[in-house]
Image (tube, rainbow, N blue to C red):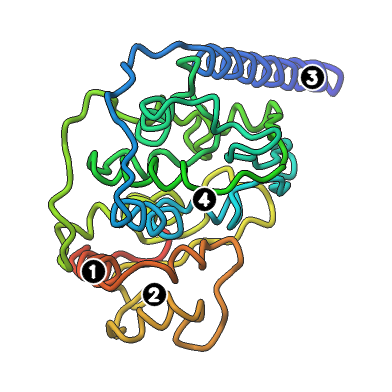
Amino acid sequence: MWKRIAKWTALVVGVLIAAVAAFVLVEVIRFDRSTSRVYDVPVPAIVRSTDPAVIARGKHLAESLGECTVCHGASMGGGRAEPLGPLGTMIIPNVTNGRDGRLAAYSDGELARLIRHGIKRDGRTVRLMPSTNCSWWPDEDVIALVSWLRTVPPVDGDPGVVELSVMAKVLDRLDAIPIDVARRIDHTSTTRPPPPSPDARYGAFVATSCRGCHGATLAGGPIPGAPPGLPVPLNLTRHETGLKGWTYDDFLALLRDGRRKNGKPLDPFMPVESLRNMNEIETRALWAYLQSVPPRPFGER
C-alpha cells in the first residue's frame, strides 16, 4: 500500500511541477512577444520651446512629478545600478547628449512619445521607465519636459543595461511589477487633466504615481510578488491604519522632511526628492484627493 501511495504522490508532484513549468514558459513567451511588439502610435508633432518659462516648468516636472532626476540623477547622466535582486540587473542610462547618452538619437516628437506612451524610437516598449505616471500629462507639460531636456549639459555616462530574469518576466505578466510599460498605457485615450489647481479633481491625476506602489485603492500593503526586502507601502486613505487624524501640515511635513508623524523616516525606496520638489498647488491637490478617497483598512489594495 505504501508503495502505491508513494507512486501516486510522485505522480501528482510531477504533474504539478510540469504544470508550473508550462505556466512559466507560457508567461515568458507572452512577455517576450509583448516587449517585441512594434506599436502603431504615431510620433506627435511636438517641437521644443526656447521660452525660459516653459523650460523652467520642464525642470520642475523632471524634479517632481516626472521623477526623472530621482532615477537618472541631477545631471541626467545615469550610471546608477538599481538593485533588482532575483529580478535581474538594471543600470540607469545616460539621457544627455554626452558620450553614451541617448538624447541625441531622439527627435522632439520621439521624446514626447517616449514620455507619454512609453514607446522607444524603434516602436517597442521601454522597460521599467514610469511613463504610466506621465501618460496623463497635457501637451504643454510634455513640451516643457522635452524643452528642458534639450538644455541639460552633456555628460559622459552609461548607456544603460536591463537584464531580466524569468521571475521578473512572470511577475510582470501577473501585474505584480510593471516592467513592460507600453502595454499598460491606453494609447487611444484623449482624457487630459484640468489646469493645475489645488483641488481633488487635479489631485486625482497627481496621485497616479502613488497607485503603482500603494495600490488602486491607496490602502497600501505588501505588493503581490514583490522580491524580499522591498518595503511595504503605507495606507494613504483616511482609515485609522492610514492618515486618519492627519492635517495638511502633517502631510506637508511628510513630503518636505521625509518623516512620518511619529518621526520615523520614510524608506529610501520612496521618491522623497521628487515629493519634496512638488509645488504648493500639487501638494494641496494631492492632499485634497487623498481626503476624498474612501477609507480602507491597510492592505486592501
Spatial separation of the CA atoms under disc 3 and disc 1:
63 Å
Q: Secondary structure at mark 3?
A: helix
Which of disc 4 and disc 1 is earlier in sequence?
4
Which residue is tagged 1?
A: 281
Q: Could you tell me the amino acid type at mark 3?
A: Ala
Residue found at x 26% / y 71%: 287
Give the label on residue 10, or none: 3
Spatial separation of the CA atoms under disc 2 and disc 1:
27 Å
User: In the rendering, at what x and y percent does residue 42 appear?
Assistant: 31, 16
Please tell me whether residue 82 is drawn above or below residue 295 in the rendered image: above
Report if residue 18 is visible in the image. Answer: yes
Which of disc 2 and disc 4 is earlier in sequence?
4
Give the label on residue 223, or none: 4
Spatial separation of the CA atoms under disc 1 and disc 4:
30 Å
Please tell me whether residue 137 is drawn above or below residue 229 in the rendered image: above
Which of disc 1 and disc 2 is earlier in sequence?
2
Asked whether 164 or 241 is in front, the reply is 164
